[in-house]
Amino acid sequence: GTSATIGRYLRYRRFETELCVADPVGSVFAAYHRSGDASLVGPGSRIEGIGRPRVEPSFIPTLVDRMLEVPNQESIAAMRWLSQLLGRKVGPSTGTNFVGMLAVAGEMRAAGTKGSILSLLCDAGERYLPTYHDAAWVEQQFGDCAPAQQRLMGDGVRSCLLPPTVHSG
């Protein structure tokens, strides 16, 4: 529904922009966007608030220019890191969006493309304190997110947000 609302507005205003939707693993929206098969069924997302096991009528693939599938551990790692960065808790769907933003930023930087990237902070993270923000719960549900967090905070951020390292010698 959110992507349809934003997509309609972008098309109506004829902004020179593209709409990219980050979709968690297990959701059918990315597969539907690729195939056009509205009968697809999947396991559903384990990232609360986004992704569905079947195609919803509110999802309009023609309004979406691109879909990115985001692994659960990366969503959680991004949620944790963004919460630290902002000084306030965000939820796991915001983490999914943040991974998508970093991917697009990295691609733009590699291509020498300039522009802006906009996303939503989908949900406050306080309601997830006993779940997604609890290390023991996350470990039990998703396994070790440390490798995803290291990738995100290491090469992921360096490749898209930080200036290139200049070596002189």
Image (cartoon, grey):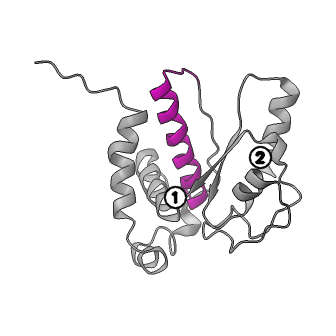
Question: Residue beneath label 1, please?
Answer: 75
Q: Position of residue 168 (x, y in %)?
A: 15, 18
Whether residue 21 sits left or right of residue 86 in the image: it is right
Q: Amino acid at mark 2?
A: Ser
Q: Is residue 50 magenta?
A: no
Asked which quadrant contains residue 18, the reply is: top right
User: Closest to the observer: 120 or 110?
Assistant: 110
Question: Residue beneath label 2, please?
Answer: 3
Q: Position of residue 11 (x, y in %)?
A: 84, 30
Furthest residue to the left?
169
- In the image, what residue occupies the spot 84% across and 24% down? 13
Whether residue 146 sits left or right of residue 91 in the image: it is left
The boundaries of the magenta stretch are 90-115
Element class at badge 2: helix
User: Closest to the observer: 107 or 135?
Assistant: 107
- In the image, what residue occupies the spot 40% across and 44% down? 156
Q: Marks 1/2: CA distance?
A: 18 Å
Element class at badge 1: helix
Q: Position of residue 131 (x, y in %)?
A: 52, 74
The quarter of the rendered structure image containing the C terminus is top left
Q: Position of residue 65 (x, y in %)?
A: 73, 38
Name the main secondary structure of what is drawn in magenta.
helix
User: Closest to the observer: 120 or 26?
Assistant: 26
**Number of other residues with Cα within 10 Å of mark 1, as a class: few under 14, some 14 to 19, many 20 or more:** many
Q: Is residue 94 magenta?
A: yes
User: Closest to the observer: 99 or 54?
Assistant: 54
